[in-house]
Image (spheres, helix red, strand yellow):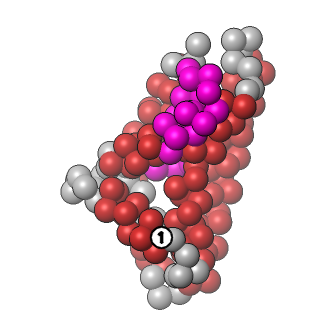
Amino acid sequence: MLLTVHATAGALIGQQINNPVLAFALAFVSHFILDMIPHGDQDWIDDYKGDQKAKVKKIISIVAIDVVILLALLVSRFYYTDSFAPSLSIASGILGGLLPDFLVGCHELSDRLFKNFYRFHFIVHDLIKVKPSAVQGIVFQAIVTGILLLSFR
């Protein structure tokens, strides 16, 4: 899933649980629960298996766009909502939700780092064999993000 979905889920967990350590741990676990759901981004970088430089460029482009969207959503949520105030628990939830993809990225850059974690991450991704299209995946992830944003108190 896109970072936006994982970070939004982590922020919601952090808002609901006013304990930074627990928020981090639950958001970390939520990452894998969300990744079990087929979400249409499975083929975005598979075309670049032989060309590592092109693969890294594409990953950086996707992450950059995703981070801009994420920041816009979070800043607008903080700015337009009185009840949603930044806190250590929210920040911890966001970090916990994003950490698994960061570790996967580290493995992508160096095959030696986090090998077992990388394998586990993609076992979780492939538990359900349905493969939605990229468009279906983006629509689904936008809906999930919208539901999460509407769930903030």
Q: Please provide the residue range marked out in magenta.
A: 1-28
Which residue, as the protein is rendered here, is positioned at the far bottom?
Answer: 50
Camera-side residue of 73 and 93: 93
Check the picture and name the quadrant holding the C terminus: top right
**Looking at the picture, does residue 119 appear above or below residue 15?**
below
**Looking at the picture, does residue 59 appear above or below residue 65?**
below
Which residue, as the protein is rendered here, is positioned at the far left?
Answer: 129
The residue at 65%/38% (across/down) is 92
Residue 131 in percent (x, y) is at 27, 56
Which residue, as the protein is rendered here, is positioned at the far right?
Answer: 79
- The kind of residue on which mark 1 rests is Ile
**Residue 88 visible to an observer of this rendering:** yes
The residue at 56%/23% (across/down) is 17
Q: Is residue 85 left or right of residue 104?
A: right
Residue 53 image-quadrant placement: bottom right
The residue at 67%/49% (across/down) is 67
**Residue 4 visible to an observer of this rendering:** no
Camera-side residue of 38 and 120: 120
Camera-side residue of 153 and 66: 153
**Mark 1 sits on what residue?**
45
Q: Is residue 68 left or right of residue 103?
A: right
Residue 143 in percent (x, y) is at 44, 32
Within 10 Å of the Cα at label 1, are there few (<14), some (14-19), or many (20+) other Cα atoms? some
